[in-house]
Amino acid sequence: MCLDPESVEHLITGKTKAVIYVGVGGNAQNYNEIRSLCAKRNLTFILDAAHMSGTTWADSGEHVGLDSDCAVFSYQAVKNCPSSDSGMICFPSAELDKQARHLSWLGIDKSTYDRYSEGSYKWRYDVPEVGYKYNGNSIAASMCLVSLRYLQSDNDHRRMLASVYSETLKDKTDIEVISHSNLINSSRHLFQIAINDRDGLMEMLWKEGIYCGVHYVANHQYPIYEKYKADVEKASWYSSRIMSLPMHLGVTEADAVYIAEKILKK
């Protein structure tokens, strides 16, 4: 469910400046191959890490994305490290970090905190470039700092649920369990399966009080992207079959067994 390196390399043209890798559900399949491809072709490698808070490399324990040119995390309320509608953008480049901070706060070159931290209040500042009102706030940050304390244990719970689902459903031949790379300890933001009668299964589970989701319908199937349609056979195939089983801290091990057994009876 992640980028195919061969497909990406085939699509690179002289206009290509960057590749955005999306760690769907916390996965990092083909990550190293895509990263190497970007290095070889001198392309900026951007990591969409919205689902990846706590996804680490199995061998080193380091967080996936430290070698990206830019990584963007989401701390929205249902994410692994929740606060409210907030997030974080990270750069290995100090210069890019500085520029992003300025752009996120209207283009102002000196924050209010900095103006108070110079011995006396220095009110004067400059606006060297027009920016945005994209700054985070202290309330969301405070919530996220508390959530961060529980990230490891919360992700362990998600991994346990994923293990139960995988083990229970592994022999059901009409279901494809979407696996995650064995090189990582995935955050397991999602547990996805693919099945031909996706909508029928979701309706049946709904009647049983089991609420699943679809992550996601392929972009080119929305009218707004009609003019960007391309030959994306795999994305189209999964778009009509993919579904996500309940994966949150309110789901117990017994719940996961119950849900999986309901699917087995379909």
Image (cartoon, rainbow, N blue to C red):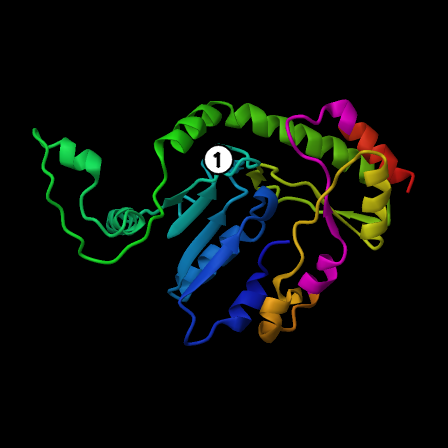
What range is drawn magenta here?
A: 234-255
Q: As drawn, is 51 to the left or to the right of 241?
A: left
Q: As drawn, is 115 to the left or to the right of 202?
A: left
Residue sitting farthest toward the right: 265
Instruction: Quickly name the residue at label 1.
Output: 84
Q: Position of residue 118 (x, y in %)?
A: 10, 32
Identified at 36% across, 45% down, the residue is 90
**In what quadrant of the picture does the C terminus appear?**
top right
Residue 241 lies in the magenta stretch? yes
Q: Residues within 10 Å of mark 1 (few under 14, many from 20)?
A: some
Figure quadrant of residue 235? bottom right
Res 171 seen here: no
Q: As drawn, is 185 to the left or to the right of 71?
A: right
Figure quadrant of residue 62? top left
Position of residue 52 relative to residue 141, above or below, is below
Tell me which amino acid carries mark 1: Ser
Q: Position of residue 242 (x, y in %)?
A: 73, 52
Residue sitting nearer the eye, 97 or 14: 97
Q: Position of residue 168 (x, y in %)?
A: 81, 34
Q: Position of residue 104 (x, y in %)?
A: 31, 48
Residue 174 lies in the magenta stretch? no
